Structures are given as C-alpha cells and as structure tokens.
C-alpha cells in the first residue's frame, strides 16, 4: 500500500520566530497598520475640528489632520513590530506573568516613549514654520501626559490580536497532527487487513497444489506456476492502495485457473465487465477473497457443477461489482457470516478504511440457490482510449 506521506507538521508560527521580523513581513503588516491607524487619525482630527467649530475658532482643516498624525502615526510604525513580538512571545496561562514583565512591559514603555519623542520632534518643526514655536520636550511631555494610557491600551489590543492568532495557529496545528495520526492509524489498519488476506490466500492455494501432487503432477506444476505469477503481481501491488479493475481481473483470471485444475469442467467462471469500468480503481485483492468464498462454499462443499460470475458496471457515477455463484447454500445470517468469514469481514473493513461510508458491501442469498455479493465504490474514471468490453468464460 502507499506509505502515508506525512512529514512532521511544520508549525505555522515558524515565520514568527525571527526577530526582528523579515522586511517583507513587516511591509505587509505595515500596510494593514496604516489603514487602521489612519481611521484613528481621521476620527481624532474630525472630533477636534468639531470642538473648535463649537467654540467659534477654526483653523485650516489640514492643520487638524497634521496634529492627529503626529499623535498616532508613530504607533502605526510600531504596530507590526508589536504584533510580531506578540507572536514571538505569546502570553499563555503558564507564562503570563513572565511575559507581561518581559518583553511586553518593556516594549510598551519603549513605544510610549518613542511615540512621545516622535511627536515632540515633528511637532516642534511644524510649529516653527506654521504656529508659535513649542519645544520638543514640552510636546513630548504633553504626549505622555495625555496619550500614554490610550497608547498602552492600543499596545494591549495588538498583543491580544497576536495572542489570538497564535492560539488559532496552534489549534490548526493540533488538528493537522490529529488528522495525520488518524491517517497513519488507518494506513496501519489497512495494511493489517491486507496482511491477513495474503497468508490466507497463499495457504489455500498451496493446499490445492498439494492435493494434486500425487494424482496429477502436471496440474500441480501448473498451479505452482500460476501461484508464482500471482505472488509476483501481489508484490508489485504492495505499495499501492488501488489498482485498475483490468489489473484486478487479470489477477482473478490467474486465480480461477488454479481452481479449474482442482474442479475441472465442474467449474465455470464468467466475467462481464463494461468497457467504461476497466480503468476504475479498486483495492488490490478485492475480488479474489469473494471468488474464493464462492468456490469453498459452493462447488467445494456441494456436488455438481457451479457457475461463478463477476459483473462490473458503472452505476451513479461510481463502480458496482457483483460476484454470483449458483451452487452455494446460505445457512446463516449475513451478520454472522461477516463476523466469522475472513474474506467478507476484511473486504468490508478495507472498503471502510479507504472510502468511509461512500462504499458498501452487501451479501445476500439468491432466489432459489446460490449467493451474491454486491460492492459499490465511488470512483473517478481514468481515461482509456477505445476500451473494449471484457466477457470471459472459463469452463
């Protein structure tokens, strides 16, 4: 079967482990930050303008925008760094006290101080050319006195957003790990089911050869040659979960050839496969256990002749397979047969592992005598040029 290609999941927080953040990441975050802080700048400039209009003292509208920009655009430059710091040092229930003290308290105080310094320098240059000059120290002190608390609140909001994003990524990472674990478990279970089928099939085939060794050595040799071909095909299919139906029918034809050496003309085997189904994918060794059951519980237990038929047709966008035989007698309920029989039980379990509830296997008795197994598999069809119908009879 296919080995599950699962590398260790890479944490989505890996890109946040670099400090300072890469320039490309900072630029993307800065674009979002400028949009958010521009709304704050526009809102504050509008509020101050309305207040001045109420007092009857209105300056140029651009003046209000400039001072609001001095007040807050420093935070726009810091926000990507704060967000990256929050992702690099996330706050959790076990480390919140340590992380609040370092690095976030230190970073918050630094941001407040740098914003005040930027406002003081930019404001003093602006007042020197457009208003009564104000010193940078006075403007910086005013910024700390009036806007330190809103700045601390803004810092906390950015850290909270970063913590939420970190938690979201951790949840996604756990979901990915859980999904990969479930995939590995399903793969292991599927492999276990297949390993149960292989020795079961090999034992029964060798038993058939042993019964012919003394009575018909040439037939026994033919059985062993066919068995070697079957084993070669089986080994080729060990690394895949699905094979084309045409390949499965080829395998089945070799197996039936072995059974024909045992039962001769008493056994008739027919395959009716629509050409459109030959490239549908099916689990390897899907039909062989069902045909083996038909042989064992039909002609293997009852006198007379038996006909085993395999049908393959497209149904509802998927593949429908049927295995019929006319000489079986169903002496127990289908539930008990699924519990006792290795072939039926493992086939149903393999379909469940590969396709979930989208596939089904039904066992039923025919009207007078015989039994049938119906399998429905959801499949995508592979393109095949000029497919030819398969109708084969082995008697």
Image (cartoon, rainbow, N blue to C red):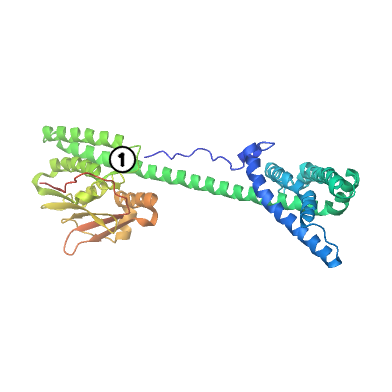
Seen from the viewer's position, the closer of residues 55 and 297 is: 55
Q: Residues within 10 Å of mark 1 (few under 14, many from 20)?
A: some
> Does residue 210 lie above or below 270 as drawn?
above
- On the image, which quarter does residue 16 sit in? top right
Which element carries disc 1, helix, strand or loop?
A: helix
Q: Which quadrant would residue 150 be assigned to in this image?
A: bottom right
Question: Percent from the top left, x then y, of residue 254?
Answer: 19, 40
Q: Is residue 247 left or right of residue 115?
A: left
Name the quarter where the N terminus is drawn: top left
Q: Residue at x 22, y 49 (%)?
A: 291
296 to the left or right of 35: left
How far across and how far down the image is residue 237, in percent? Answer: 31, 38
Q: Nearer the viewer, residue 153 or 217?
A: 153
Which percent across, then down, holds residue 249? 21, 44
Residue receiving disc 1: 198
Residue in view at x 21 percent, y 58 percent: 371
The residue furthest bottom is 54
At horizontal 48% and vertical 47% (from top left) the residue drawn is 182
Residue 368 in view here: yes
Residue 71, image x, y percentages: 80, 51
Q: How many marks?
A: 1
Of residues 132 and 98, which is closer to you in this image?
132
Identify the residue shown where x is 65% and y is 45%: 29
Tell me if I can see residue 331 in this picture.
no
Q: In this rendering, would 71 be left or right of 307?
A: right
């Amino acid at each position: 079967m296919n080995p599950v290609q699962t590398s260790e999941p890479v944490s989505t927080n890996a890109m946040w482990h670099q400090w300072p953040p890469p320039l490309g990441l900072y630029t993307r975050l800065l674009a979002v930050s400028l949009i958010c802080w521009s709304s704050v700048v526009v809102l504050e400039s509008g509020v101050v303008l309305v207040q001045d209009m109420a007092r009857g003292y209105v300056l140029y509208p651009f003046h209000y925008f400039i001072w609001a920009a001095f007040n807050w655009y420093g935070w726009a430059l810091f926000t990507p760094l704060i967000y990256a710091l929050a992702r690099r040092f996330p706050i959790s229930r076990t480390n919140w006290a340590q992380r609040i003290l370092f690095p976030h308290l230190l970073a918050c105080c630094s941001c407040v101080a740098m914003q005040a310094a930027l406002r003081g320098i930019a404001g003093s240059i602006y007042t020197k050319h457009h208003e009564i000059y104000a010193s940078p120290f006075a403007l910086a002190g005013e910024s700390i006195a009036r806007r330190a608390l809103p700045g601390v609140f803004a810092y906390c909001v950015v850290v909270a957003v970063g913590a939420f994003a970190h938690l979201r990524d951790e949840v996604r990472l756990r979901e990915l790990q859980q999904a990969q674990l479930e995939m590995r478990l399903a793969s292991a279970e599927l492999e276990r089911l297949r390993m149960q089928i292989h020795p079961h099939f090999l034992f029964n085939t060798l038993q058939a050869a042993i019964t012919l060794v003394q009575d018909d050595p040439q037939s026994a040799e033919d059985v062993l040659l066919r068995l070697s071909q079957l084993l070669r095909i089986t080994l080729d299919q060990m690394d895949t979960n699905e094979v084309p139906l045409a390949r499965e029918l080829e395998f089945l034809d070799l197996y039936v050839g072995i059974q024909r050496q045992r039962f001769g003309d008493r056994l008739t085997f027919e395959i009716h496969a629509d050409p459109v189904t030959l490239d549908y994918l099916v689990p390897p060794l899907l039909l062989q256990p069902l045909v083996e059951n038909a042989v064992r519980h039909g002609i293997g237990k009852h006198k007379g002749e038996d006909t085993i038929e395999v049908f393959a047709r497209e149904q509802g966008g998927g593949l429908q397979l049927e295995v019929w035989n006319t000489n079986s007698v169903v002496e127990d309920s289908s539930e008990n047969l699924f519990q006792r029989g290795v072939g039926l039980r493992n086939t149903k379990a393999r379909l469940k592992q590969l396709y979930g509830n989208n596939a089904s296997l039904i066992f039923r008795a025919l009207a007078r005598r015989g039994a049938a197994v119906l399998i429905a598999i959801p499949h995508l069809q592979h393109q095949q040029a000029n497919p030819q119908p398969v109708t084969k009879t082995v008697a």
